[in-house]
Amino acid sequence: MTAEAVAGSKPGGRTLKLMLATEELTTLYPHRLRTAPAIALAMEGFEATDADAARNLLADYGNSYLHQIVRATGVSLRLWKANYPSYRHSSQISVGKIRFPHERYDATPVTLYAAANSAGRDPLERYLKYYQVLEFFMPRAAKHATAQGNQARFELDKLRALAVMTITPAQLEGFLRGNALLSKLADKNLITDVPELKANVNSNPFSGLDYRPDVAERVYKIRCRIVHAKEGGGPNQTEVIQPYSREARDMGSDLRLIRFLAERALRHWATSLS
């Protein structure tokens, strides 16, 4: 069985379509998993004067379209490059509505986001890939903070500035409300040695509380516990989160949280496609 995700503007206009790759394409662009079908992106109704213009159209619209599919379905997709390895991904895909792309995303964080969305990756790898999306935008956030008269020299300061720029308190409160997410992020025993988020007796956020500084600090501290593997726990005497450990297995809520931050950053700095 094959499935196609189609997005279009109007009859006779530009369209993007996922389809099975032809034999000619699979010969030109070989992929490692021979048992898996090769997928191609078909673009119709676009005008390009030369090969460079065609490649630019593919990069702009293709990256945006694939990012929307990644965001809606949870699969990991990216435009093919010769130096990309292929990974086996989950076969369970829930297809949602994919809009015709109207925004251009930076290619590097889109690629990192797609890698983080791969269900086959270790949770710690996924977390760091989402964090790299945030790192990509930190210089922009720091520059904006400095222009506003606030210093953002250290990484945690930059992450806080990014959270303030890309998410409103109401958006973050809405994300945390009405599900089991906050109850786990408020559990100090789930992921130790990182600040827990505050929750009321119903495991919902306190109305009007700005969670952005606390979220930024939690995201940063978990990142530090993943990457700082010094004997003795480093300067803060916190142990590294080890692969396949109980804490690594229980990172689902924190993966949802950092994925939300990465999505908001990508959307904030997206530009309009003509």
Image: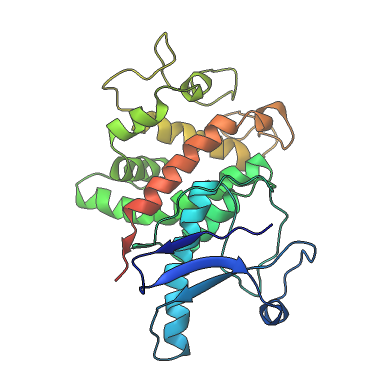
Residue that lies at the very extreme toward the front in this rendered image: 11
Residue that lies at the very extreme toward the right in this rendered image: 35
The answer to whether residue 37 is left or right of residue 155 is right
The answer to whether residue 75 is left or right of residue 158 is right
Tell me the quadrant of the picture where the N terminus can be found. Answer: bottom right
Q: Position of residue 171 (x, y in %)?
A: 32, 34
In front of the other: 259 or 214: 259
Residue positioned 70% across, 47% down in the render: 120
Q: Quadrant of residue 255?
A: top right
Q: Position of residue 174 (x, y in %)?
A: 35, 29
Residue that lies at the very extreme toward the top in this rendered image: 201
Tell me, yes or no, if residue 14 can be seen here. yes
Tell me the quadrant of the picture where the C terminus can be found. Answer: bottom left
Residue positioned 72% across, 38% down in the render: 243
Q: Is residue 189 above or below residue 142?
A: above
Q: Is residue 231 above or below residue 273?
A: above
Tell me, yes or no, if residue 131 can be seen here. no
Tally of numbered tags: 0
Q: Position of residue 189 (x, y in %)?
A: 59, 17
In front of the other: 91 or 246: 91
In front of the other: 249 or 75: 75
Q: Position of residue 25 (x, y in %)?
A: 66, 79
Residue positioned 61% across, 73% down in the render: 81
In front of the other: 64 or 136: 64
Residue that lies at the very extreme toward the left in this rendered image: 148
